[in-house]
Amino acid sequence: MPLLRSAFIALSTNQTMRRFSENSGVGRKLSSRFVAGLEVEDVLRAAEMLNNYGMTATLDSLGESVATEIEAHRSAEIYHRLLDSIAAKKLKANISVKLTQMGLELDPDLAYKIASGLTEHARATGNFLRIDMEGSPLTQVTLDLVRHIHAREEYRGHIGIVIQSYLYRSEADIQQLINDGIRVRLCKGAYQEPPAVAFPKKTDVDTNYVRLMGILLSSPLYHGIATHDEAMIEATKNYASNQGIAPDHFEFQMLFGVRRDLQKRLVREGYNVRIYIPFGREWYPYFMRRLAERPANVFFLAKNLIRS
């Protein structure tokens, strides 16, 4: 499985495969398990459906690095449209944004201005903006940007961040974020990182995940525990129970189309569940990273493709 994971991560950056897949009917059919659709209307319908199941949602317009400032502003406009639509439809949903999609690698000041504008829009509509974490070379600049925006009094509580348990630095980062009052989504991490910065063994990543989960749940803030790993979910439930932490003090977060049975079971058990719903035409890198995270999805997709 480690070899399969590495292969899918490598494929996520293969431009030839990306062009072929994103223009292929078979590729789009395979991705539909994990991607709500290509347009804003598709993701809004998916969010409404999940709300009806008792789940909240995070909406993500797929895409990563942009080449021009115009592309960065075009990407941001999709999120502004989402915030307006969420408010108009009274959906229980927020948004999740990658800073490279907002021009971070072109100009950090551009990304800061765009992210600040989205945070202002989230504040004005009573919503929340989550900044996704990308590869480790961007960890510090992402943290700095989020902390800078959150430090503005009017934006406190309207912007949060993602922390990855496979990075050695994550415990110190979480302690600082809690001190700043910034909400965290905890995940394991889906990028190929060198052993100099990240735990190479899954057992160590899991151990760190449980340690970080305990720190987050014991804080006064409302955090997201993002995982499909039933061992991590049980560890979270047990920690909360043993520490007298109420189920509504945190939420489990899961991906659209992954372990739907588990999502519904957690809702029945009285836990808050938020589903991360991606959409858009640039779905290939996201799709490959989902296969890398859980190679069993490959066999599931192949079986359903044969049946259809």
Image (cartoon, helix red, strand yellow):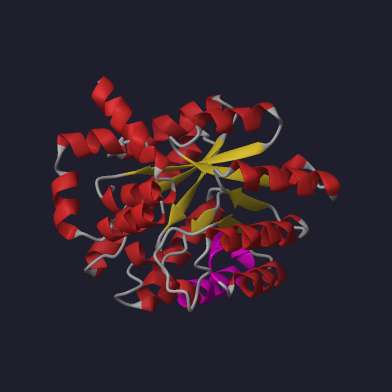
Residue 98 visible at all: yes
Quarter of the rendering containing residue 172: bottom right
Q: Which residue is rendered at x = 39% and y = 48% of the image?
A: 290
Q: In which quadrant is the C terminus drawn?
A: top left
Residue 124 highlighted magenta (yes or no) = no
**Could you tell me which residue is drawn at 54 percent across and 63 percent down?**
164
Q: Residue 230 in the image: x percent, y percent?
A: 61, 41
Nearest the eye: 63 or 301: 301
Q: Position of residue 150 (x, y in %)?
A: 59, 68
Q: Is residue 159 above or below residue 249?
A: below
Residue placed most toward the observer, 91 or 105: 105
* Residue in the foreground of this view, choosing between 111 and 56: 56
Q: Is residue 148 magenta?
A: yes
**Rendered location of residue 34, percent (x, y):** 37, 38
Q: Is 171 above or below relative to 94?
A: below
Which residue appears at 47% of the width and 63% of the height?
133
User: Seen in the image, is 89 located left or right of residue 280?
Assistant: right
Q: Is residue 107 left or right of residue 54?
A: left
The percent position of residue 304, horizontal first and vertical second, equals 31, 26
Q: Is residue 183 visible?
A: no
| Residue extent of the magenta highlight | 141-167
